[in-house]
Image (cartoon, rainbow, N blue to C red):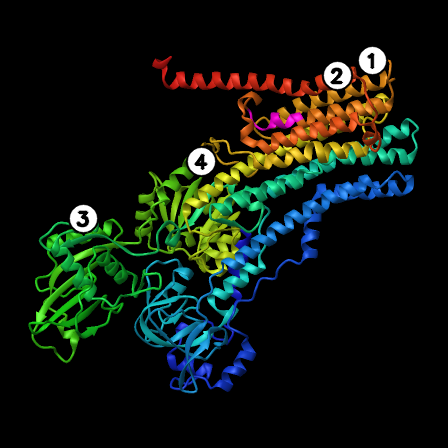
Amino acid sequence: MAIYNIFVNFVHTITEVNGMEKWYQYTNNQVMAYLKSDLGKGLSQAQADERLGQHGRNQFAEQQKESLAAAVVHQLKDVATLVLVLASVLSLMLAIREGHGYLEPAVIAAIIIMNMVLAISQERRAEQALEALQNMNSPICLVLRDGVQSEVDTALVVPGDIILLSTGALVPADARLINSTSLQVEEAALTGESEPAEKDAEIRLEGKVPLGDQVNMVFSGTLVTGGQAAAVVTATGMNTEMGRIAGYLNDTQKLKTPLQERLDKIGKLISFIAVISAVVLVMIGLFQGEELWSIILLAVSLAVAAVPETLNLIVTLSLTNGVQKMVRKNALIRKLPAVETLGNTSVICSDKTGTLTQNQMHIEQLWMCGSKVVSSSEMLDVGYLDFLQELAIAGNAAAEIEADGGLRYMGNPTEQAILKLLHEKEQVPINTRRAGEVPFSSQRKMMTVVVEQAEGGYLVLTKGALDRMPLKEGIAKEAKYVHDRFAKNALRVIALASKQVKKLPRDLEQLESNLELVGMIGLIDPPRLEAKAAIIRAKNAGIRTIMITGDHAATAGAIARQIGILGEGQQVLTGAELDEMNDDTLIDTIAQYSVYARVSPENKIRIVEAWQEKDAVVAMTGDGVNDAPALKAADVGVAMGITGTEVAKSAADMILTDDNFTTIVEAVEEGRNVYSNIRKVIYFLLVCNMSEIIGMLFAQIAGWGKLVTPVLLLLINVLGDGIPGLYLAKETSDPRLMTRGPIDRSESFFADGLTRAIAQQTAAATFVMLTAFYLGKFIDVSTVYLPSEELGQTMAFLVLGWSSIIHIFTVRSRKSIFQRSIRDNVPLVYSAIAMILVFGLMVALPPFGKIFGLVPISGTHWGAAVLLSLIPIMIAEFFKFWDNRADRMAHRNRLVQHHPIED
């Protein structure tokens, strides 16, 4: 829970830049006096300029980008890379001393450079794509300066400025309301609540009040959805609520991903093997009386043999290939390791609003007095259309035609939903002349609109909460039943009542009496159509989806049941209940809860870290600033590219450019494919490298001499393994990937039988390589070419190179090589054939082979080399047949156990 504790301490120690911590506790006059601002005139331009110099521009500080030098140093921290650097230096020293050429150190250095260039360039491209993706909001706001209303760049707003807000305006900074009329502000980006918050300048609050309940404050980046107000700016830039979270995100570091941890372990293992092998080799050489520099040359050879030079390169290409595929599926990856980490995800903690739901209110059901409840799709009766028209008249939502011919809706989301449904039914709102209005307030929970009637008199329409309606005959039993039924289904209930009057009183609130109930509507922020299918698919893949939202528990629970998140025996937990739990209790009971409602940013971090304490690999999705700390804390942070705030995008590892939850599941599948391919790469490369080490040690102990020279090892590792290995990154997914459980965080690359497979193939490859060397050095099979160390090295090179290349067909699948089509991965097949021919030509063409210390061989040697090179794959095929036969029998036994009649 380290990140959570840092975040809490950070928040608790921060104070407002102007010295007043809790602006909501003070009256308007106290705030204005403290900020030295004038309600009628605002700040003077001179004051504004002075404060701009004091507090800086109203912008977030950009996160410092990693320099090129720092990126290079970061790449060089890899243990296996350090071994390669050491081998390159020693090889260079030997080249200078012995004068035998600089091919070896040049090739090793080239491999190191290629690894770094690929990794750094890919991450830089992702950052550039992110910058291009950023949605810039309107930079203009309305400010009172020198008594004049002026349009000012939001970056120039300063504490003490009087800002003027109206429907559709983006709040440019944190501010204390001075006066307000029916003000409603959509704060989902900050609090997670889908419903607009009702604001009131006249209320003064006491004590510690959560952001979502600070009704006399407005916050930077939120949107005015109704009413109007004037407010005095209390904080700008990094001192705003959003700015604080952005600052926290810039100061924290993520834990290593499971892939990075596994690769670190591989690097340490390889380095350990290299060091131990080199020490053993040096000791043997000294015991046998060899020259020191000769022993050092052997040690360099062993280091080259121990380190799979192309491992990091191929892993990087696998990740890059995964990134490219994800981009085509609308997922932008900012950090390469996140690709593989997605594949290991076992828990997805998802925000509700805008991620699982559409973030748009929708009328689900309607009811009119004396009629039955109907869904919005069934609403064909003329009476219901008239009812909908009256609901639209009783609101202030509006729509305007955009340049592309579409409609842009403005106003309260609830009223927007009424207008949208009216348009869906191909109805145009009736044009009426409004005679008056009693605005909505949080105290009254209703609003009234008075319109003139053509035949004379006035129609009074009151819209709001049923229990606040002053009905003539009280609430009927049927109406109460319908209301409770709507509420039980987590629908927001809006009632409409009306009456006709001939004259209007001076106080229009007097009209709110003796009303006749017309009907009710039930609204909800509906789930995305594709979300349920994606959640089921994730469940089948062993991934649990958790909903974390700032919304109410009843609403969150209803949505969660509807889309399959909240199952039998699972519970909803509120943020208040979570605050009462200590960390140990939360960790022990975390699996019981599938929905967390009314949560704070601190709560979200605790939830993520509690799952991580249970060794889960956690992906956190969200779009708001309130989601950003948890996005940073999660193993994979997933932000929405369209509706997501810039703070959330900056904190995330992956950005969904279509805001589609389904894309996350598709990205998980691609991540699993990448992980599978990386395991194949490790299997492929380690067999070759381990056989080289064991073979060289055996030859030295046996007194046979140097099995293979360093330059030949490089040729095998870089050309024979590296070039075909590059195409393992493009292996196609196993269709069963999403029917298996996720990989455990602590699970090794070598789990699930890979250790045994590597051992079998290493033994086979070592045997054929040693046999080939022995045949060339000690057995006289030709009258033309006599046995020699050069001939033995040539044979060992040829057999080791060919068998390593052919081995790639073994690692592609657990199926037999005869069950895989060439069309599955044509470049891999072509590259393997090409490298087999290259190695053969190096031996067959003496001028070419002489450069690398190779000598010609006889026809008998060629035949032996071909036969020996095929032995490892034949052994692999035998074990595949045996293992698959055992799997088929076990599967059949399971079927018999479950379906004995079918036997």
Give the residue type that dot 4 points to: Ala
Q: CA distance from mark 3 to mark 2?
A: 80 Å
Q: How many marks?
A: 4
Please state which amino acid type lies under the numbered disc 2. Ala
Which label belongs to residue 541?
4
Q: Quadrant of residue 447?
A: bottom left
Is residue 111 found left or right of 128 in the rendered image? right
Check residue 378 in the rendering and tell me which mark sits there, or answer none.
Answer: 3
Label 3 with label 4: CB-CB less than 8 Å: no
Label 4, residues with CA under 10 Å away: few <14, some 14-19, many ≥20: many
Measure the alpha-carbon separation of dots 1 and 4.
58 Å
Numbered disc in front, either 1 or 4: 1
Q: Amino acid at mark 3?
A: Glu
Task: Give the distance between the C-alpha atoms of the residues marked 4 and 2, in whole angstroms.
Answer: 48 Å
Residue type at mark 1 is Val
N-term-proximal mark, 1 vs 4: 4
